[in-house]
Image: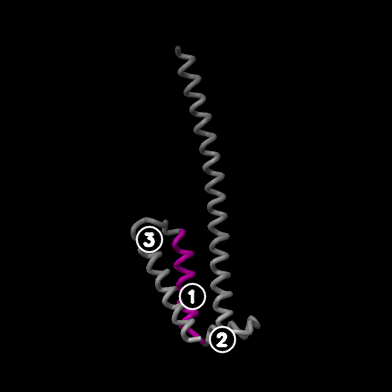
Amino acid sequence: MDRLLNVTTVLSILLLIMVLFSVRRAHIRVEYSVSWLLTSVTMLLLSRSRPVLAVITRWSGVPDTPLTLFLISGTLFLVMFFRFSMIISHLRDDNIALAQRVAILEYHIHSLEHHED
């Protein structure tokens, strides 16, 4: 169990460092990095506070503490992936609307050029 918690701690710290460097170098926008930062901090805190993890295990009825840790981390990542899927879908819709507006503007410019000739 201790080995699993240590591995989770190391992975959480690595994720935290990667996100901070990505924000610093402008590879990821700050508003999107917040989810990753919260997830990495949550995993770090859970991996370092064994009593809290034990309470969550008893409360949830999961038979094993490592399973609880993986269920929590899996749930956090699923929520994040769903959130980012919604953001990507919204951006795709905005992109289509923008492409349509550009096409309409090009059509109007083209018709004005032919009208002047």
Q: Which of the two discs, 1 and 2, labels the residue nearer the N terminus?
A: 1
Q: Which of the two discs, 3 and 2, labels the residue nearer the N terminus?
A: 3
Query: Does residue 49 sit above or below 17 in this rendering?
Result: below
- Residue at image position (48%, 84%) is 49
Look at the magenta stretch and give its main secondary structure.
helix
Query: Does residue 12 sit above or below 34 in this rendering?
Result: below
The amino acid type of the residue labelled 1 equals Met
Helix, strand or loop for disc 1: helix
Q: Which residue lies under the disc numbered 1? A: 43
Residue 54 image point, x, y percent:
56, 86
Q: Which of the two discs, 3 and 1, labels the residue nearer the N terminus?
A: 3
- Residue at image position (49%, 27%) is 106
Extent of the magenta region: 32-50
Is 43 inside the magenta-drawn segment? yes
Q: Which residue lies under the disc numbered 3? A: 22
Q: Are marks 3 and 2 in contact (CB under 8 Å)?
A: no
Q: Which residue lies under the disc numbered 2? A: 54
